[in-house]
Image (cartoon, grey):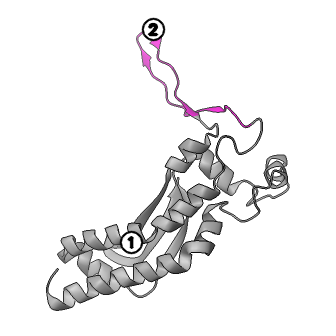
Amino acid sequence: MPTGVDIDVEGVAPLVNRLSKFDKETYKILTKEVRQGLSEVAKTAKNLTPGGTALSGWGPWLVSTGQSAQVGSIRLVQGTRDLSYDGASVRRKIRSRAVKRSQRGRVTSFSGQVVTTSAAGAIYSLAGSVNPNTPFARALRKAGRGTTWPRALTDARNKEGPQAAKAITEAIQRAAKAVETGRG
């Protein structure tokens, strides 16, 4: 599951609902502009994410996915997931996206998100958020890796979020105007 931060947009669910069902081209443009509006938040999060290794001695960790198969007398290799931290890989997997949440076919909320889809990135981002006294979380803090959760993502949202929210609001206003003028 990705770990991320939201930039919520209040009161636009009816417009997004209409666009996603009846004006798909304008909806597509809106989601693209939301992603572009969040690009600076994602860029800042990537810059705040440590390169190389986040903590000396981290990994490689191979965790079983529980997936294996048996064909006759041959047992196929069980799947594993690599949780080792590689800064370049974690940075590549920080992305922005537009998210609509629906209930019973109606859009109930719309937001922009910046997420990390890397397992190691999620571990780095959330370590210590539930129990700040684990040895791993203490070691990250001691290494100067911050105390806000999710790490890097929250700081990036706090720094670049107001500009992103403004860009998203302007994109929504353009979409609403396109619907009003019948361009969409």
Could you tell me what secondary structure mostly forms the magenta stretch?
loop
Badge 1 amino acid? Val
Helix, strand or loop at label 2? It is: loop
Residue 24 vs residue 38, the one in the foreground: 38
Helix, strand or loop at label 1? It is: helix
User: Residue 78: within the magenta?
Assistant: yes
Q: Give coordinates of residue 144: x percent, y percent.
A: 80, 55
Q: Answer above or below: position of 179 versus 3.
A: below
The quarter holding residue 159 reads bottom right
Residue beneath label 1, please?
Answer: 34
Q: Answer above or below: position of 167 versus 79.
A: below
Residue contact at pointers 1 and 2, CB within 8 angstroms? no
Magenta range is 58-81
Q: Give coordinates of residue 20: x percent, y percent.
A: 26, 73
Tell me the residue at 34%/71% (across/down): 33
The quarter holding residue 141 reads bottom right
Q: Give coordinates of residue 10: x percent, y percent.
A: 45, 85
Residue beneath label 2, please?
Answer: 73
Going by the image, does 42 lie left or right of 54?
left
Tell me the residue at 56%/73% (across/down): 160
Numbered badge on residue 91: none
Q: Which of marks 1 and 2 is in front?
A: 1
